[in-house]
């Protein structure tokens, strides 16, 4: 049961990845507002430069240029989660997912039933978080 709770909490990060990954959803999200706030208070390294996928990819590279190499060792691979918002969300989702695997214990006597519980738990939680992370109505 603990693993189901971990998966449900982890879907917050997975829904955030989906939002940050598409410009249309990102512009309506709490993440865009957070980025604007950090830009406004003079912390651009946590602003749009970090959260907006159209420009955040440059953070992996020295002076934003892939031809100049990585900004710091392994910034384009193992440590990419330090360079932009989408990869932070991915890192947190993977940590939750792996934790759920480590803490898995059967909920029912049937593995297939457990998998269905996880599937529907994930789907319902993802839909919930995806909607609450939107600041502007989806109908726009």
Image (tube, rainbow, N blue to C red):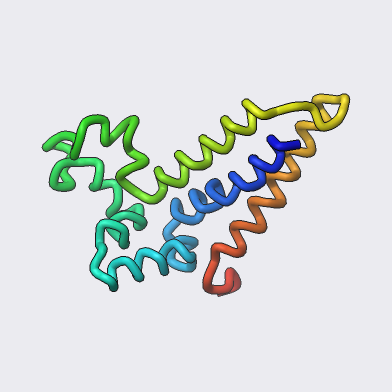
Whole-percent x, y for residue 134 in the image: 54, 66
Which is more toward the observer, 44 or 130?
44
Q: Which quadrant is home to the N terminus?
A: top right
Residue at x-position 26% and y-position 30%: 74
User: Which residue lies at the image location 60% right of the left edge and 64% below the top edge?
Assistant: 132
| Corner quadrant of residue 52 | bottom left
Q: Is residue 90 left or right of residue 59?
A: right
45 shown above or below 68: below
Q: Percent from the top left, x then y, of residue 81?
A: 36, 41
In the figure, 60 relative to 107: above or below?
below
Q: Is residue 94 left or right of residue 78?
A: right
Please state if 109 lies on the left or on the right of 102 as rendered. right
Tell me if 82 is positioned left or right of 97 in this view: left
75 in relation to 9, above or below: above
Q: For the point 29% across and 46% down, which residue is it?
A: 57
Query: Residue 70: x, y in percent?
Result: 19, 35
**Residue for point 32% across, 31% down:** 77
């Amino acid at each position: 049961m603990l693993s189901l709770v971990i998966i449900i909490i982890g879907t917050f990060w997975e829904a955030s990845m989906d939002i940050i990954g598409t410009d249309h959803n990102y512009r309506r999200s709490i993440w865009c507002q957070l980025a604007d706030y950090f830009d406004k208070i003079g912390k651009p390294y946590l602003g749009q430069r970090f959260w907006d996928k159209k420009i955040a990819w440059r953070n992996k590279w020295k002076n934003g240029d892939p031809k100049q190499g990585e900004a710091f060792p392994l910034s384009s691979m193992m440590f990419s989660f330090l360079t932009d918002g989408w990869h932070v969300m991915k890192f947190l989702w993977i940590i939750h997912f792996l934790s759920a695997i480590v803490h898995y214990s059967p909920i029912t006597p049937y593995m297939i039933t457990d998998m269905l519980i996880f599937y529907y738990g994930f789907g319902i939680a993802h839909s919930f978080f995806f909607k609450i992370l939107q600041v502007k109505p989806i109908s726009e």
